[in-house]
Image (tube, rainbow, N blue to C red):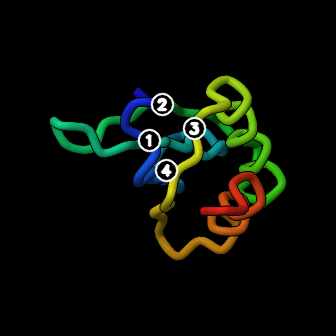
Amino acid sequence: MLQRYGSSVCLIDATYHTTVYGMPLFQLCVLTNCGFVVVGTFLSTDEQKETISAGLRIFAELCPQWSPKYFMSDFCEAQIAAAESVFPST
């Protein structure tokens, strides 16, 4: 799903203080022919650029052809910086 639909737009979002656990859950979503679908998730110990970058790098290594043209995020500077560092052409 990531390789097939993720070349155009990829959405990254995280849960913030909505669970009893102190770890944010990041979700990667892509636009398919049926709407936005979650194609990957990762837990992080914090919401820092380096940690989010590490999670994104795992997906980039698992799917080396994946290079989204655009990333969509809320205004979280750490998420934006992480996406730009892992995918510099995004």
Q: Quadrant of residue 35?
A: top left
Question: What separation in Å lies between label 2 and label 4 (alpha carbons)?
Answer: 24 Å
Q: Are marks 2 and 1 in contact (CB under 8 Å)?
A: yes
Whether residue 12 sits left or right of residue 86 in the image: it is left
Specify the amino acid type for callout 4.
Thr
Question: What separation in Å lies between label 3 and label 4 (alpha carbons)?
Answer: 24 Å
Q: Residue at x 68, y 35 (%)?
A: 60
Sequence-wise, which precedes: disc 3 or disc 1?
A: 1
**SS of the residue under disc 4:** loop
Q: Position of residue 2 (x, y in %)?
A: 46, 32
**SS of the residue under disc 3:** loop
Say which mark, if any, is on residue 6: 1
Specify the amino acid type for callout 1.
Gly
Question: What separation in Å lies between label 3 and label 1 (alpha carbons)?
Answer: 7 Å
Q: Are marks 2 and 3 in contact (CB under 8 Å)?
A: yes
Sequence-wise, which precedes: disc 1 or disc 4?
A: 1
The C terminus lies in quadrant: bottom right
Question: What separation in Å lies between label 1 and label 4 (alpha carbons)?
Answer: 21 Å
Marks 1, 4: nearer the viewer = 1
Say which mark, if any, is on residue 28: none
* Residue 76 higher or lower than 49, as above or below: below
Which residue position holds label 4? 15
Q: Compare residues 50 and 69 and report the one nearer the observer.
A: 69
Q: Position of residue 34 (x, y in %)?
A: 16, 36
